[in-house]
Image (cartoon, helix red, strand yellow):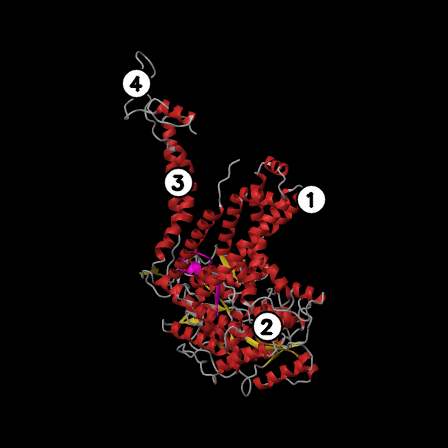
Amino acid sequence: MTEDGAAGSTGAGGALAGGAVAGGAEPERAAGPGPAPARRRRPDPLPYLLVSPLALFIIVLAIVPAIYTLAQSFYRVQSLDPPVRFNGLDNFRALLTDPTVQASALNTVAYVVIGVALSTVLGLAMALTLHRGFWGRSVLIAAMILPWALPGVVEGIVWTGIWDANTGLLNSLLTSAHLITHYQVFLGHNRLLTILLIEIVQVWQMTPLSTLLVLAALQNIPGDLYEAAQLDGCTAWSTFSRITLPLVRPGVAIAMVQALIATLNVFDQPYVLNGAADTGASLTMQTYFISFQNLDFGKGYALSLMITVATLLGSYALIKIVYRPVEF
Amino acid sequence: MVPRRLGRARTALVAGLAGTSAMAMLTACGGGGGSAAVPSSGPTTGVTISVALAAEPPPKAALDAFTKSTGITVKWTNIDWDSLQTKITAAAVAKTYFADATDVDWSRVGQLSRLKAFYPMEKLMDTRSLAADMPQLTSFTSAGHVVGVPYDASFDVVTINKTLFDKAGVKQPTTMAEYTDALKTIKSKGVVKYPLSIPFAAAEGLSTYWYQATAAFGGTVLDSKYKPQFTDPASPGYKAAQWMVDAFTSGLVPPGNINVSDTQGQQTLMAKGSVASIFGDYSGTIGSLYDVPASSTVVHQVGYLATPGVSGPAPNNSNPDGIGVPVTAKYPQAAARFIAWFTSAQEQADFAGLNGADKAMPGYALPSHVSAVQRLATKGQLIGGQQLSDMLQKSSRPIFPGGAPSWYPEFSRDVYTNLHAAAAGSESVDKAVKAIASSANRLSAQGS
């Protein structure tokens, strides 16, 4: 216990003992000549000014547009029907009752479920494989990064050449292997199949980042835990489920959040692979069509806001459910 | 960190940084804006103008000659069409500088006119003298103003692979009924498995294909007041939609075309001899694609067919590209001088190859000047030239009698998404047509 009765660890108590005062009274001064009492230091403005250009950059390019979007989403902003006027929740009501937006929302939910699940499972599997050292590991990691580095549009074009029903590689391979007798239409007919195939392309892009995040978490786990488990006779599955999986939860949570953000905002792959068809259009595509084709920016702002809120809520839910702090 | 001992110098440094930051912020916040009125004067020489089009630039020698004669340097940017339209729209709405001269697509004339995004070209150059030789100029006129000047003469045509038609023993059809029968005969005789290409991808090409098919069935999609003309099953537009979907479901069109765009159909199907015909092809594709050995396996096999109609030849819908001057242009008068040069009959003839390959503009198929087309046809340098010239003068017409409405992009998206869904089987033709009509009624109530 310190002099002022406060309790705490040794370090904290020492600090309290050194600096705590009772009732806010001035500290006792030693009798006779000694150092002058410490004055309150004025905050130094220089560090703030040095970072101000970057801070201004972020404020102007991110925060100001976000506040503007939030405000304008409650206004009727149509370039072909000026002036701008307040219309409350009408934009949101119109979007929620628009069948095209509803269809896109369902498509996007499917993209999220498939994309987050697949990228997480595949990312975990690949991280576990790469965790062990083997010949060619670094080459494999470099090759694995490639899909992540490619723009979504390029990937869409590449995979068009695979899924295409008239000249696609997959049809050609299946026909050569006598697995099918005539070319199949993979995209555009069946909605679920179309969404699945489009999302496979995005998973191909996202999984490398998931892998690296989980791999980083894996490499933080002390090896002596596994040694102890081995000595105790744990099976491989027990070791994985009771040691590995709980301790990589932070990495898995971050990987899932980044997958959620990417899939909720997917645009390139469905647009290139399936055009504007309702079978695969995402919410972000609708935002683009509403804003830049219909020139209805009020609804575009509102839809952007709704996507942002969904992203925040989804990310929070994932962190709450999956993330656990880990200390070694 | 600046040491405290610098005293006043430190204070000056801090103040200077604060001032610099404030100025940077003000600079970032400033800029933009443009004048809606045509400026009475401006530099027409000694400047560099920016031109943004979805096309390769003219030969360097041609641009250098232009610079030498006018003192205007041209900085050309080639942007794909979809991205370009988004950039033009965004710049128009934000009233920010984008280019001195840029694309004006026929489909965007109404929208750009209503946004007052482009200068009226008749105030910047002599467009009246162009009218007689440039029949598609009317497609670029809205509310009495010329929004852009067409620099090519693209219009819908029917292309057929004559070799495949001959193999099947069918004569060239003149009516829609004969055309459909010819396709069925080609299929039944096994000449090709799928004789017709229709681009059912949910994209603009599907919409224009439907407009052309509607013209062939004897009507238009919208009347001069933008009211839908296709809701009655006996109407040309309804019949056209039904014909297209029936062709797909009955096996005349490759199943994979559900996700094939217009250019993909040209490049991967027609140019490879996989199909025998495209009903809504684009003028000039024979010279620029089908007869080019590097990109086609059907060289000298494809020809133009007069559009089969109900009882004879039908109109050809025009869908040309134009060029105009945005109101945010830095040098509108100089840009207008460039446009006058770029769209002149002589330059267009050169770009199309009249005077040699070294003066030709890559991918430039058909001049917008009838006289230039005629010269090319006379000299035998335009495949199907006389036929194209006749179509351009006599049978090409705007898709919408009242011009493209300002809400056209939204309407077109409703057209192609519903027709795509009908072909994919997720809705009936009747439901698709009703949805498109509902869209047209809702949008036309907002004005044109």
The amino acid type, in three-letter code, at marker 4 is: Glu
Q: Which residue is mark 3?
A: B21
Q: Circle 1 sits on which residue?
A: A136
Whether residue A37 sits left or right of residue A316 in the image: it is: left
Who is closer to the viewer here, B440 or A109? A109
Contact flag, marks 4 and 1 (Cβ < 8 Å): no
Q: Amino acid at mark 3?
A: Ser
Amino acid tagged 2: Gly
Q: Quadrant of residue B125?
A: bottom left
In the image, the segment drawn in magenta is B88-106
- Secondary structure state at the residue bearing disc 1: loop
Which label lies toward us, 1 or 3? 1
**Sooner in the amino-acid sequence: mark 4 or mark 1:** 4
Front in this rendered view, residue A68 or B405: A68
N-term mark: 3 or 2: 3
Please, what secondary structure does the residue beneath circle 3 have?
A: helix
Residue B81 to residue A51: above or below: below
Report the residue marked by disc 2.
B284
What x and y, as percent, mark residue B186?
66, 81
| Frontmost residue, A208 versus B313 | A208
Q: Quadrant of the N terminus of chain B?
A: top left
Q: Secondary structure at mark 4?
A: loop
Marks 1 and 3, how far apart at CA:
50 Å
The chain letter for the residue carrying disc 4 is A
* SS category of the residue bearing label 2: loop
Chain bearing tag 3 is B
Instruction: In the displayed orientation, state which residue is furthest to the bottom.
Output: B311
Q: Which mark is residue A28?
A: 4
